[in-house]
Image (cartoon, grey):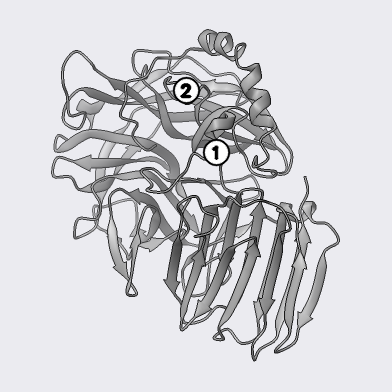
Amino acid sequence: MADMTLKKKPMDRDGFLKEMQKMEVRRQQAASDPIRLCYHLHPPVGWINDPNGLCQKDGIYHIYHQYVPFYPELCSVLWGHVTTRDFIHYEIQEPANFPDTKWDENGAYSGSAFVKDDTMYVYYTGNVRHADKEYDYITGGREQNTILMTSKDGFHFSNKRLLMKNTDYPSDLSLHVRDPQVFCEQGQYFMIQGARDLQDTGSVLLFESSNLTDWTYRLRFETKEPFGYMWECPNYLKVDGRQFLIACPQKMRKKENGLVKENLCGYFPLAYDFKGSEYDVGEFFTLDRGFDFYAPQVFQDESGRWILLGWMSTPDADYDCEVMVKNGWVHALTIPRELYVSQNGRLCQRPLKEFRQMRDDGTVKTLEAGAEFCTDVSPCFEWKLTMDDPTEAFTLLLRESAVLSYQEGVLSLDLTGCGAGRTVRSICLPEVRDLWIFSDTSSLEIFVNGGEETFTSRIYDSMEHLQVTLKAGKGRKQIELYGLHT
């Protein structure tokens, strides 16, 4: 949960329902916005950010999320709630978590869900900000409380229980400790939380429990050299026997392959037996190269798949993330993505197989060497390309003026003409074997080389007379192009 610095008005259920009765005009305005997304989760009105409490219970996927329903008017952050059985059809539910206690009165911040014995255990950070005098809100003036709620159905929750407060965390930490995730390893329960210490160094704290309620601090995961001043939104997962630690290091810049990239979100390969104090945190890999990706959360569904959703925006951007505010809503979540490990050990992302249900009849063809492919498209489409020669240069025109190009070993996404301040993002790659592109009314999600790399960005063009264009070079290309509908 990206820290929000203003002290905001608390909001309980009765207050929410009362205020929502006044919002009908704004809801209608948001619903009629032409740039409203077709197959992404976005708020019916107001602001959405971090996905929270992701889980599947009794066949129902529960997607909770950070929610400020009356934005740009201020109120404390709630948890919105959406359910689905197929990731195509969604039902918006009443918010599930209100900042309605003394432990979370200035925001029900991010957290996760853990399902055990038909009970959903929901852990989150309760934010409290004091205003009786001037504070820096780093070493004084705030509380970050770890809170537990339980539920049998994902809709009705128990009373809240305070599990930990700042004095229960290591004494060398600042007051920034948040975003708990709980999981089980070797029959024991563990919790991780993002942290910032008094020297402005980020890390992930590890706690242990035998009963899901009483937690003991074990250790912290950190790099040998300081790497960002705060690690937000941590997630631990083990895919195909490989361990990974996802985190969002704040205020981090890193020179990578000769290109300067702001690493807002990524993962470390992890080696740890969850017994002793020795561990190894490997090299940091960026999860997404685009302009709009942050605060992802992962969970394992009832079929065993690891699924990721992220916030399709980013904090503190120097480009416009609020183009749609004038119409009463702002931001969205990414499409859900299945995680898997490539042969070289990279954590990869691919769209869920359920998305095939949205395809129309489409076009499937082979583009011979030297040929050009150009066709009109609607704003909502899926485009898959496989390259016979993965080292050849190419240029793709997407929609109105977005350009994806591969030249001299550099893959670049150029949104200068349609990005509301977004310009160019690039990565050095020795080859581009395949591309899988999902376009919605105002978003692009591009999966490269089986999802080893991705680019996620909002896009704002006229949505009229759109095309996709590709000129083949010396190699053939396999093309699949589908319109998408829900």
Q: Residue furthest bottom?
A: 474
Whether residue 448 appears in this view of the structure is no
Label 2 vs label 1, nearer the camera: 1
**Which image quadrant is residue 107 in?**
top left
Residue 21: percent from left, percent from top = 62, 11
> Relative to the observer, which residue lies in front, 420 or 145?
420
According to the image, label 1 marks what residue? 54
**37 relative position to 191: left or right:** right
Which residue appears at 44% of the width and 64% of the height?
Answer: 425
Which residue appears at 48% of the width and 18% of the height?
Answer: 98
**58 relative position to 284: left or right:** right
59 shown above or below 282: above
311 shown above or below 258: above
Which residue appears at 43% of the width and 13% of the height?
Answer: 100
**Which image quadrant is residue 169 in?**
top left
Callout 2 touching callout 1 (CB < 8 Å): no
Residue 68: percent from left, percent from top = 49, 26
Amino acid type of the residue tagged 1 in the rendering: Leu
How many numbered discs?
A: 2
Q: Residue 149: which numbered mark, if any?
A: 2
Whether residue 61 appears in this view of the structure is yes
Q: How many residues crowd around disc 1 within 10 Å: few (fewer than 14), some, or many (20 or more)?
A: many
**140 relative position to 39: left or right:** left
> Relative to the observer, which residue lies in front, 4 or 64?
4
Amino acid type of the residue tagged 2 in the rendering: Met
Circle 2: element type: strand
> Relative to the observer, which residue lies in front, 356 or 191?
356
Which residue appears at 34% of the width and 31% of the height?
Answer: 4
33 shown above or below 8: below
Circle 1: element type: strand
Residue 189: percent from left, percent from top = 41, 39
